[in-house]
Image (cartoon, rainbow, N blue to C red):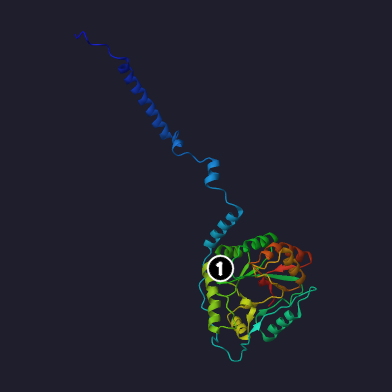
Amino acid sequence: MNNNSKPPSKIFILLPVALLLAAVLLTALLAAMVRGGIGSITDPPESTTQQAVTNPPESSADAVAAQTSSRRAERQALPTKEITTENPAEIPSLPTTPIAYSYGVASGGKPHQISVDNQAFFSSKGYNAVAYDNISEDKRLYLTFDCGYENGVTATILDVLKEKNVPAAFFATQHHLKTSPEIAARMLDEGHIIGNHSVSHPDFTEISRAKMIEELQGFDNFLRQSLGYTAPFFRFPEGSYNENALQLVQSLGYKSVFWSVSWADWDTTKQQGKQKAFDTISSRLHPGAIILLHAVSTDNAAALGDIIDYARANGYEFKALTDLPD
Protein backbone atom coordinates (compact mmCIF):
# COMPACT_ATOMS: atom_id res chain seq x y z
CA MET A 1 0.00 0.00 0.00
CA ASN A 2 1.23 3.45 -0.84
CA ASN A 3 1.41 5.41 2.34
CA ASN A 4 1.15 8.64 0.26
CA SER A 5 -2.38 7.79 -1.07
CA LYS A 6 -5.30 9.98 0.18
CA PRO A 7 -9.00 9.19 0.66
CA PRO A 8 -11.29 10.23 -2.29
CA SER A 9 -12.39 13.88 -2.29
CA LYS A 10 -16.06 14.63 -1.46
CA ILE A 11 -16.50 16.31 -4.83
CA PHE A 12 -15.88 13.02 -6.63
CA ILE A 13 -18.44 11.37 -4.41
CA LEU A 14 -21.16 14.02 -5.04
CA LEU A 15 -20.57 14.39 -8.77
CA PRO A 16 -22.33 11.17 -9.81
CA VAL A 17 -25.27 12.10 -7.60
CA ALA A 18 -25.55 15.52 -9.23
CA LEU A 19 -25.38 14.02 -12.69
CA LEU A 20 -28.10 11.54 -11.77
CA LEU A 21 -30.36 14.31 -10.48
CA ALA A 22 -29.76 16.37 -13.63
CA ALA A 23 -30.70 13.40 -15.78
CA VAL A 24 -33.91 12.93 -13.83
CA LEU A 25 -34.82 16.61 -14.16
CA LEU A 26 -34.02 16.62 -17.89
CA THR A 27 -36.24 13.58 -18.42
CA ALA A 28 -39.08 15.26 -16.56
CA LEU A 29 -38.62 18.41 -18.59
CA LEU A 30 -38.75 16.57 -21.90
CA ALA A 31 -41.84 14.68 -20.82
CA ALA A 32 -43.57 17.91 -19.88
CA MET A 33 -42.73 19.45 -23.24
CA VAL A 34 -44.18 16.47 -25.06
CA ARG A 35 -47.39 16.86 -23.08
CA GLY A 36 -47.47 20.55 -24.04
CA GLY A 37 -47.04 21.80 -20.52
CA ILE A 38 -43.98 23.90 -21.35
CA GLY A 39 -44.70 24.47 -25.00
CA SER A 40 -45.86 27.97 -24.08
CA ILE A 41 -42.25 28.96 -23.54
CA THR A 42 -41.40 28.76 -27.24
CA ASP A 43 -44.90 28.93 -28.75
CA PRO A 44 -47.10 30.83 -26.34
CA PRO A 45 -50.81 30.62 -27.00
CA GLU A 46 -52.05 34.05 -28.07
CA SER A 47 -53.84 35.77 -25.24
CA THR A 48 -56.86 37.96 -25.91
CA THR A 49 -54.61 40.97 -25.55
CA GLN A 50 -52.10 39.64 -28.08
CA GLN A 51 -54.84 38.96 -30.59
CA ALA A 52 -56.12 42.48 -30.23
CA VAL A 53 -52.64 43.81 -31.00
CA THR A 54 -51.65 41.54 -33.86
CA ASN A 55 -55.14 41.10 -35.36
CA PRO A 56 -57.20 44.18 -34.51
CA PRO A 57 -60.95 43.81 -34.94
CA GLU A 58 -62.12 45.20 -38.24
CA SER A 59 -63.80 48.59 -38.20
CA SER A 60 -67.33 48.75 -39.59
CA ALA A 61 -65.96 50.23 -42.83
CA ASP A 62 -63.40 47.44 -43.12
CA ALA A 63 -66.07 44.85 -42.44
CA VAL A 64 -68.33 46.29 -45.15
CA ALA A 65 -65.43 46.32 -47.61
CA ALA A 66 -64.53 42.73 -46.78
CA GLN A 67 -68.12 41.56 -47.17
CA THR A 68 -68.52 43.47 -50.42
CA SER A 69 -65.29 42.02 -51.79
CA SER A 70 -66.50 38.54 -50.93
CA ARG A 71 -69.86 39.09 -52.57
CA ARG A 72 -68.20 40.58 -55.67
CA ALA A 73 -66.05 37.47 -55.97
CA GLU A 74 -69.20 35.35 -55.81
CA ARG A 75 -70.89 37.16 -58.69
CA GLN A 76 -71.11 35.17 -61.88
CA ALA A 77 -70.01 37.01 -65.00
CA LEU A 78 -72.63 37.45 -67.68
CA PRO A 79 -71.73 36.62 -71.27
CA THR A 80 -70.68 39.61 -73.30
CA LYS A 81 -73.15 40.92 -75.82
CA GLU A 82 -72.49 42.07 -79.34
CA ILE A 83 -74.65 45.13 -79.81
CA THR A 84 -75.98 45.57 -83.29
CA THR A 85 -78.24 48.09 -84.97
CA GLU A 86 -80.03 48.07 -88.27
CA ASN A 87 -78.49 51.41 -89.17
CA PRO A 88 -74.87 51.59 -88.01
CA ALA A 89 -74.10 54.46 -90.38
CA GLU A 90 -75.43 58.00 -90.16
CA ILE A 91 -79.09 58.31 -91.06
CA PRO A 92 -79.64 61.37 -93.24
CA SER A 93 -83.23 61.81 -92.11
CA LEU A 94 -82.24 62.21 -88.47
CA PRO A 95 -81.08 65.64 -87.31
CA THR A 96 -77.52 65.79 -86.02
CA THR A 97 -77.75 69.31 -84.65
CA PRO A 98 -76.45 69.28 -81.06
CA ILE A 99 -78.98 69.80 -78.29
CA ALA A 100 -77.54 71.08 -75.02
CA TYR A 101 -79.94 69.70 -72.46
CA SER A 102 -81.55 72.22 -70.13
CA TYR A 103 -84.14 71.64 -67.42
CA GLY A 104 -84.98 75.00 -65.88
CA VAL A 105 -85.40 75.75 -62.18
CA ALA A 106 -88.50 74.03 -60.84
CA SER A 107 -90.42 75.80 -58.09
CA GLY A 108 -93.74 75.71 -56.28
CA GLY A 109 -93.89 71.94 -56.52
CA LYS A 110 -94.08 72.05 -60.32
CA PRO A 111 -91.54 71.21 -63.05
CA HIS A 112 -90.15 74.11 -65.05
CA GLN A 113 -91.72 74.60 -68.47
CA ILE A 114 -88.43 73.61 -70.08
CA SER A 115 -88.69 70.15 -68.51
CA VAL A 116 -92.32 69.92 -69.57
CA ASP A 117 -91.32 70.76 -73.14
CA ASN A 118 -88.46 68.25 -73.04
CA GLN A 119 -90.79 65.43 -72.10
CA ALA A 120 -93.36 66.51 -74.67
CA PHE A 121 -90.65 66.44 -77.36
CA PHE A 122 -89.48 62.93 -76.42
CA SER A 123 -93.05 61.62 -76.33
CA SER A 124 -94.14 63.26 -79.58
CA LYS A 125 -91.16 61.82 -81.44
CA GLY A 126 -91.57 58.37 -79.92
CA TYR A 127 -88.15 58.33 -78.27
CA ASN A 128 -87.58 56.07 -75.30
CA ALA A 129 -86.33 58.98 -73.20
CA VAL A 130 -87.50 60.58 -69.99
CA ALA A 131 -87.00 64.02 -68.46
CA TYR A 132 -89.48 63.44 -65.63
CA ASP A 133 -92.43 61.21 -64.83
CA ASN A 134 -95.51 63.08 -66.10
CA ILE A 135 -97.75 60.03 -65.99
CA SER A 136 -97.86 58.79 -62.39
CA GLU A 137 -100.38 60.63 -60.26
CA ASP A 138 -98.65 60.10 -56.91
CA LYS A 139 -95.78 62.24 -55.60
CA ARG A 140 -92.83 60.19 -56.84
CA LEU A 141 -89.17 61.09 -56.89
CA TYR A 142 -86.40 59.25 -58.74
CA LEU A 143 -82.94 59.77 -57.26
CA THR A 144 -79.96 59.42 -59.60
CA PHE A 145 -76.24 60.10 -59.34
CA ASP A 146 -73.57 60.61 -61.98
CA CYS A 147 -70.25 58.91 -61.20
CA GLY A 148 -67.39 59.86 -63.48
CA TYR A 149 -64.71 59.22 -60.88
CA GLU A 150 -64.47 58.46 -57.18
CA ASN A 151 -63.89 61.33 -54.76
CA GLY A 152 -64.23 59.37 -51.53
CA VAL A 153 -67.83 60.45 -51.06
CA THR A 154 -69.90 57.66 -52.61
CA ALA A 155 -69.59 55.36 -49.59
CA THR A 156 -71.17 58.06 -47.41
CA ILE A 157 -73.99 58.47 -49.92
CA LEU A 158 -74.57 54.71 -49.86
CA ASP A 159 -74.61 54.75 -46.06
CA VAL A 160 -77.38 57.37 -46.08
CA LEU A 161 -79.40 55.54 -48.74
CA LYS A 162 -79.16 52.33 -46.73
CA GLU A 163 -80.16 54.03 -43.50
CA LYS A 164 -83.13 55.74 -45.16
CA ASN A 165 -84.06 52.73 -47.32
CA VAL A 166 -84.04 54.75 -50.55
CA PRO A 167 -83.33 53.27 -54.01
CA ALA A 168 -81.09 55.13 -56.43
CA ALA A 169 -79.47 54.81 -59.83
CA PHE A 170 -75.76 55.46 -60.31
CA PHE A 171 -74.74 56.37 -63.86
CA ALA A 172 -71.09 55.37 -63.94
CA THR A 173 -68.32 55.55 -66.48
CA GLN A 174 -66.07 52.56 -67.09
CA HIS A 175 -63.28 54.46 -65.35
CA HIS A 176 -65.35 54.55 -62.18
CA LEU A 177 -66.10 50.84 -62.35
CA LYS A 178 -62.44 49.96 -62.88
CA THR A 179 -61.03 52.18 -60.16
CA SER A 180 -63.76 51.62 -57.55
CA PRO A 181 -64.92 48.01 -57.96
CA GLU A 182 -65.87 47.60 -54.31
CA ILE A 183 -68.08 50.69 -54.42
CA ALA A 184 -69.75 49.43 -57.60
CA ALA A 185 -70.35 46.01 -56.06
CA ARG A 186 -71.83 47.62 -52.97
CA MET A 187 -74.27 49.61 -55.12
CA LEU A 188 -75.64 46.36 -56.51
CA ASP A 189 -75.53 44.49 -53.21
CA GLU A 190 -77.69 47.19 -51.64
CA GLY A 191 -80.28 47.11 -54.40
CA HIS A 192 -79.34 50.11 -56.53
CA ILE A 193 -79.10 50.40 -60.29
CA ILE A 194 -75.87 50.98 -62.19
CA GLY A 195 -76.67 52.81 -65.40
CA ASN A 196 -74.56 53.19 -68.53
CA HIS A 197 -72.74 56.54 -68.72
CA SER A 198 -70.37 55.37 -71.48
CA VAL A 199 -66.77 54.17 -71.44
CA SER A 200 -64.96 57.51 -71.73
CA HIS A 201 -67.63 60.21 -71.32
CA PRO A 202 -67.49 61.73 -74.84
CA ASP A 203 -69.86 64.28 -76.32
CA PHE A 204 -72.26 62.08 -78.31
CA THR A 205 -72.95 64.88 -80.79
CA GLU A 206 -69.30 64.80 -81.88
CA ILE A 207 -68.80 61.08 -82.49
CA SER A 208 -70.00 58.67 -85.15
CA ARG A 209 -72.73 56.13 -84.63
CA ALA A 210 -70.10 53.39 -84.74
CA LYS A 211 -68.22 55.12 -81.93
CA MET A 212 -71.44 55.49 -79.95
CA ILE A 213 -71.93 51.75 -80.21
CA GLU A 214 -68.38 51.17 -78.96
CA GLU A 215 -68.99 53.43 -75.96
CA LEU A 216 -72.26 51.74 -75.00
CA GLN A 217 -71.15 48.20 -75.73
CA GLY A 218 -67.77 48.60 -74.08
CA PHE A 219 -69.31 49.80 -70.82
CA ASP A 220 -72.04 47.16 -70.83
CA ASN A 221 -69.68 44.27 -71.50
CA PHE A 222 -67.28 45.44 -68.80
CA LEU A 223 -70.20 45.61 -66.37
CA ARG A 224 -71.34 42.15 -67.41
CA GLN A 225 -67.89 40.61 -66.98
CA SER A 226 -66.81 42.39 -63.81
CA LEU A 227 -70.08 42.41 -61.86
CA GLY A 228 -72.41 40.02 -63.65
CA TYR A 229 -74.92 42.79 -64.22
CA THR A 230 -76.60 44.83 -66.92
CA ALA A 231 -79.35 47.46 -66.97
CA PRO A 232 -81.26 49.19 -69.80
CA PHE A 233 -80.66 52.78 -68.66
CA PHE A 234 -78.32 55.30 -70.30
CA ARG A 235 -77.43 58.90 -69.56
CA PHE A 236 -75.76 61.10 -72.15
CA PRO A 237 -72.46 62.52 -70.91
CA GLU A 238 -73.01 66.20 -70.05
CA GLY A 239 -76.57 65.79 -71.31
CA SER A 240 -75.37 66.56 -74.83
CA TYR A 241 -77.37 64.76 -77.52
CA ASN A 242 -79.16 65.01 -80.85
CA GLU A 243 -81.94 63.04 -82.48
CA ASN A 244 -79.48 60.84 -84.31
CA ALA A 245 -77.96 59.79 -80.99
CA LEU A 246 -81.36 59.38 -79.31
CA GLN A 247 -82.47 57.01 -82.05
CA LEU A 248 -79.28 54.96 -81.87
CA VAL A 249 -79.41 54.60 -78.08
CA GLN A 250 -83.04 53.51 -78.31
CA SER A 251 -82.26 51.02 -81.09
CA LEU A 252 -79.77 49.35 -78.75
CA GLY A 253 -82.44 48.75 -76.12
CA TYR A 254 -81.72 51.63 -73.76
CA LYS A 255 -83.93 54.25 -72.16
CA SER A 256 -82.22 57.65 -72.13
CA VAL A 257 -82.61 59.13 -68.66
CA PHE A 258 -82.39 62.90 -68.35
CA TRP A 259 -83.50 64.96 -65.32
CA SER A 260 -85.73 67.81 -64.13
CA VAL A 261 -84.00 68.70 -60.83
CA SER A 262 -80.30 69.35 -60.36
CA TRP A 263 -77.83 72.06 -59.41
CA ALA A 264 -74.19 73.12 -59.90
CA ASP A 265 -72.63 70.52 -57.62
CA TRP A 266 -69.95 68.89 -59.79
CA ASP A 267 -67.01 71.21 -59.15
CA THR A 268 -65.20 69.87 -56.08
CA THR A 269 -63.28 73.13 -55.70
CA LYS A 270 -66.49 75.18 -55.44
CA GLN A 271 -68.58 73.34 -52.88
CA GLN A 272 -71.02 75.68 -51.15
CA GLY A 273 -71.97 73.81 -48.00
CA LYS A 274 -74.61 71.43 -46.72
CA GLN A 275 -77.28 74.10 -46.24
CA LYS A 276 -76.93 75.39 -49.80
CA ALA A 277 -77.37 71.87 -51.16
CA PHE A 278 -80.42 71.26 -48.98
CA ASP A 279 -82.09 74.58 -49.77
CA THR A 280 -81.50 74.27 -53.51
CA ILE A 281 -82.69 70.70 -53.98
CA SER A 282 -85.60 70.80 -51.54
CA SER A 283 -86.99 73.98 -53.17
CA ARG A 284 -86.97 72.34 -56.62
CA LEU A 285 -88.79 69.09 -55.83
CA HIS A 286 -91.93 68.31 -57.78
CA PRO A 287 -94.02 65.18 -58.43
CA GLY A 288 -92.31 62.87 -60.91
CA ALA A 289 -88.95 64.63 -60.61
CA ILE A 290 -85.82 62.85 -61.74
CA ILE A 291 -83.10 64.26 -59.50
CA LEU A 292 -79.53 64.38 -60.77
CA LEU A 293 -76.75 64.75 -58.20
CA HIS A 294 -73.03 64.21 -58.68
CA ALA A 295 -71.48 61.64 -56.37
CA VAL A 296 -68.26 63.66 -56.04
CA SER A 297 -70.01 66.42 -54.08
CA THR A 298 -69.37 66.59 -50.34
CA ASP A 299 -72.30 69.01 -50.09
CA ASN A 300 -74.67 66.40 -51.53
CA ALA A 301 -73.41 63.71 -49.19
CA ALA A 302 -73.83 65.97 -46.16
CA ALA A 303 -77.33 67.15 -47.09
CA LEU A 304 -78.76 63.92 -48.54
CA GLY A 305 -80.31 62.60 -45.34
CA ASP A 306 -82.07 65.89 -44.65
CA ILE A 307 -83.29 66.12 -48.26
CA ILE A 308 -84.80 62.64 -48.00
CA ASP A 309 -86.46 63.44 -44.67
CA TYR A 310 -87.85 66.72 -46.02
CA ALA A 311 -89.24 65.04 -49.14
CA ARG A 312 -90.99 62.34 -47.16
CA ALA A 313 -92.38 64.86 -44.69
CA ASN A 314 -93.96 66.59 -47.67
CA GLY A 315 -95.63 63.47 -49.01
CA TYR A 316 -93.05 62.31 -51.54
CA GLU A 317 -91.88 58.73 -51.97
CA PHE A 318 -88.71 57.54 -53.64
CA LYS A 319 -88.94 55.07 -56.50
CA ALA A 320 -86.42 53.17 -58.63
CA LEU A 321 -86.07 53.82 -62.36
CA THR A 322 -87.58 50.40 -62.93
CA ASP A 323 -90.83 51.87 -61.54
CA LEU A 324 -91.06 54.47 -64.32
CA PRO A 325 -94.28 54.02 -66.29
CA ASP A 326 -93.89 52.87 -69.88
Location of residue 232 with respect to 27 vertically, above or below: below
Left or right of 156 in this view: 49? left
Instruction: Give me the residue at 60% from left, 56% from top.
Output: 61
Amino acid type at circle 1 is Leu
Q: Is residue 228 visible?
A: no
Which quadrant holds residue 136?
bottom right
The count of marks equals 1
Tell which residue pokes out farthest to the front in this image.
269
Dot 1: what SS?
A: helix
- Residue matched to label 1: 177
Q: Position of residue 45 (x, y in %)?
A: 49, 39
Task: Classify residue 92 as left or right of residue 323.
Answer: left
Write down the quadrant of residue 129 in the picture: bottom right
Hey, which residue is sitting farthest bottom in the picture? Answer: 92
Above-or-below relation of 61 to 199:
above
In the rendered image, the quadrant that contains the C terminus is: bottom right
Q: Is residue 60 visible?
A: yes
Picture quadrant where residue 107 is located: bottom right
Q: In the rendered image, which quarter contains the N terminus?
A: top left
74 vs 208, nearest the viewer: 208
* Residue 178 screen position, x and y as percent: 53, 67
Above or below, 187 against 26 in this view is: below
Q: Residue at x 66, y 64 (%)?
A: 298
Residue 74, position as x, y percentages in the image:
53, 61
Residue lying at the far right of the rendered structure? 108
Q: Residues within 10 Å of mark 1 (few under 14, many from 20)?
A: many
Q: Residue at x 40, y 30 (%)?
A: 29
Nearest to the observer: residue 207 or residue 94 = 207
Q: Locate residue 24, reporting x and y percent.
A: 37, 25
Residue at x 62%, y 61% (from the top left corner): 155
